[in-house]
Image (cartoon, helix red, strand yellow):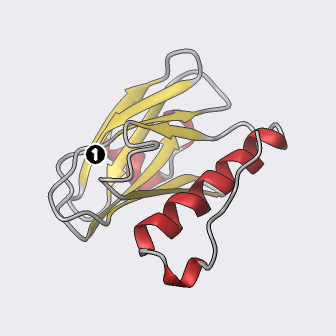
Amino acid sequence: MKTVFPWPLFLMDINMVLFYNNRFLLGLVDWADIERQFTSSHDGRREVPVVIRLHEIQEGSLLYVLNQGGSPEKVTIQIIQAEEGDYLLEEIFQRRSFTLQTTDKRLQLTTADIPASDVAIYSIWERLNCCKYYQDLL
Protein backbone atom coordinates (compact mmCIF):
# COMPACT_ATOMS: atom_id res chain seq x y z
CA MET A 1 0.00 0.00 0.00
CA LYS A 2 1.45 3.32 -1.07
CA THR A 3 0.72 6.31 1.16
CA VAL A 4 0.80 9.77 -0.34
CA PHE A 5 1.47 12.57 2.12
CA PRO A 6 0.13 16.03 1.36
CA TRP A 7 2.71 18.78 1.22
CA PRO A 8 3.61 21.09 2.92
CA LEU A 9 2.88 19.57 6.33
CA PHE A 10 3.56 22.81 8.21
CA LEU A 11 0.45 24.35 6.62
CA MET A 12 -1.80 21.53 7.80
CA ASP A 13 -3.91 21.29 10.93
CA ILE A 14 -1.90 19.64 13.75
CA ASN A 15 -4.46 16.83 14.07
CA MET A 16 -3.98 15.95 10.42
CA VAL A 17 -0.18 15.96 10.85
CA LEU A 18 -0.51 13.62 13.84
CA PHE A 19 -2.85 11.39 11.85
CA TYR A 20 -0.34 10.98 9.00
CA ASN A 21 2.53 10.55 11.46
CA ASN A 22 0.67 7.76 13.30
CA ARG A 23 -0.34 6.15 10.01
CA PHE A 24 3.28 6.13 8.86
CA LEU A 25 4.58 4.69 12.16
CA LEU A 26 1.92 1.97 12.30
CA GLY A 27 2.71 1.05 8.69
CA LEU A 28 6.40 0.87 9.57
CA VAL A 29 5.62 -1.42 12.53
CA ASP A 30 3.57 -3.71 10.26
CA TRP A 31 6.26 -3.72 7.60
CA ALA A 32 8.97 -4.62 10.14
CA ASP A 33 6.72 -7.36 11.55
CA ILE A 34 6.98 -5.92 15.07
CA GLU A 35 4.44 -7.22 17.56
CA ARG A 36 2.84 -4.40 19.50
CA GLN A 37 3.11 -4.72 23.28
CA PHE A 38 -0.42 -3.42 23.79
CA THR A 39 -3.62 -2.43 22.05
CA SER A 40 -6.34 -0.08 23.26
CA SER A 41 -9.96 0.79 22.74
CA HIS A 42 -8.78 4.13 21.34
CA ASP A 43 -6.50 2.81 18.58
CA GLY A 44 -7.24 4.69 15.37
CA ARG A 45 -9.69 7.15 16.94
CA ARG A 46 -8.46 10.59 15.86
CA GLU A 47 -11.33 12.46 17.50
CA VAL A 48 -10.25 11.25 20.97
CA PRO A 49 -6.46 11.70 21.28
CA VAL A 50 -5.13 9.33 23.96
CA VAL A 51 -1.40 8.60 24.22
CA ILE A 52 -0.31 5.33 25.83
CA ARG A 53 3.28 4.42 26.68
CA LEU A 54 4.56 1.24 28.30
CA HIS A 55 8.02 1.34 29.89
CA GLU A 56 9.66 -1.81 31.17
CA ILE A 57 11.67 -1.47 34.35
CA GLN A 58 13.59 -4.06 36.36
CA GLU A 59 10.69 -4.79 38.71
CA GLY A 60 7.91 -4.79 36.09
CA SER A 61 6.36 -2.08 33.92
CA LEU A 62 5.03 1.45 34.06
CA LEU A 63 1.99 2.30 31.96
CA TYR A 64 1.26 5.95 31.12
CA VAL A 65 -2.17 6.87 29.75
CA LEU A 66 -2.44 10.53 28.71
CA ASN A 67 -5.81 11.99 27.73
CA GLN A 68 -5.13 14.86 25.33
CA GLY A 69 -8.83 15.29 24.56
CA GLY A 70 -11.31 17.83 25.84
CA SER A 71 -13.49 15.45 27.87
CA PRO A 72 -12.94 12.64 30.38
CA GLU A 73 -12.10 9.29 28.81
CA LYS A 74 -12.14 5.67 29.96
CA VAL A 75 -9.63 3.49 28.10
CA THR A 76 -9.43 -0.30 27.85
CA ILE A 77 -5.90 -1.58 27.27
CA GLN A 78 -4.70 -5.12 26.53
CA ILE A 79 -1.06 -5.67 27.41
CA ILE A 80 0.87 -8.71 26.18
CA GLN A 81 2.73 -10.39 29.05
CA ALA A 82 5.54 -12.92 28.83
CA GLU A 83 4.01 -15.12 31.52
CA GLU A 84 0.53 -16.26 32.47
CA GLY A 85 -0.51 -15.44 36.01
CA ASP A 86 -1.67 -12.80 38.44
CA TYR A 87 -0.37 -9.24 38.23
CA LEU A 88 -0.47 -6.50 40.82
CA LEU A 89 -1.36 -3.05 39.47
CA GLU A 90 -1.31 0.26 41.25
CA GLU A 91 -2.68 3.53 39.90
CA ILE A 92 0.06 5.74 41.28
CA PHE A 93 -1.77 9.07 41.73
CA GLN A 94 -4.91 7.55 43.29
CA ARG A 95 -2.95 4.95 45.30
CA ARG A 96 -5.48 2.34 44.15
CA SER A 97 -4.13 -1.25 44.04
CA PHE A 98 -5.74 -4.30 42.47
CA THR A 99 -4.81 -7.61 40.89
CA LEU A 100 -5.60 -8.84 37.41
CA GLN A 101 -5.14 -12.25 35.84
CA THR A 102 -3.90 -12.84 32.30
CA THR A 103 -5.96 -14.57 29.64
CA ASP A 104 -3.89 -15.98 26.74
CA LYS A 105 -0.92 -13.97 28.06
CA ARG A 106 -2.93 -10.74 27.79
CA LEU A 107 -3.68 -8.48 30.69
CA GLN A 108 -6.81 -6.37 30.21
CA LEU A 109 -7.10 -3.12 32.13
CA THR A 110 -9.90 -0.55 31.99
CA THR A 111 -8.94 2.80 33.46
CA ALA A 112 -11.15 5.00 35.57
CA ASP A 113 -12.28 8.22 33.86
CA ILE A 114 -9.15 10.21 33.02
CA PRO A 115 -9.98 13.93 33.03
CA ALA A 116 -9.22 16.07 29.97
CA SER A 117 -5.52 16.96 29.66
CA ASP A 118 -4.61 14.61 32.50
CA VAL A 119 -2.69 11.37 32.94
CA ALA A 120 -3.02 8.05 34.75
CA ILE A 121 0.12 6.09 35.60
CA TYR A 122 0.04 2.42 36.56
CA SER A 123 2.81 0.25 37.94
CA ILE A 124 2.51 -3.40 36.93
CA TRP A 125 4.25 -6.29 38.71
CA GLU A 126 3.98 -10.02 38.53
CA ARG A 127 2.31 -10.89 41.80
CA LEU A 128 5.05 -13.34 42.79
CA ASN A 129 7.85 -10.92 41.95
CA CYS A 130 6.56 -7.69 43.44
CA CYS A 131 8.72 -5.92 45.97
CA LYS A 132 8.33 -6.30 49.75
CA TYR A 133 6.20 -3.14 50.12
CA TYR A 134 3.57 -4.47 47.74
CA GLN A 135 3.64 -7.99 49.16
CA ASP A 136 2.47 -6.46 52.44
CA LEU A 137 -0.64 -5.15 50.63
CA LEU A 138 -1.59 -8.67 49.58
Residue where numbered disc 1 is placed: 97
Relative to residue 5, is residue 11 drawn left or right?
left
Tell which residue pokes out farthest to the right in this image: 32
Quarter of the view holding residue 100: top left
From the viewer's side, name the closer residue of 67 and 55: 67
**Residue at the image point whose x is 53% and y is 25% from the top:** 106
Q: How many marks?
A: 1
Relative to residue 104, is residue 117 drawn left or right?
left
Tell which residue pokes out farthest to the top in this image: 104
Tell which residue pokes out farthest to the bottom in this image: 10
Q: Is residue 116 above or below residue 73?
A: below
Relative to residue 11, is residue 5 drawn left or right?
right
From the viewer's side, name the closer residue of 12 and 101: 12
Relative to residue 56, is residue 138 drawn left or right?
left
**Residue at the image point whose x is 18% and y is 65% from the top:** 70
From the viewer's side, name the closer residue of 108 and 32: 32
Amino acid type of the residue that numbered disc 1 sits on in the rendered structure: Ser
Give x and y (percent) for residue 101: 43, 23
Q: Is residue 107 above or below residue 63?
A: above
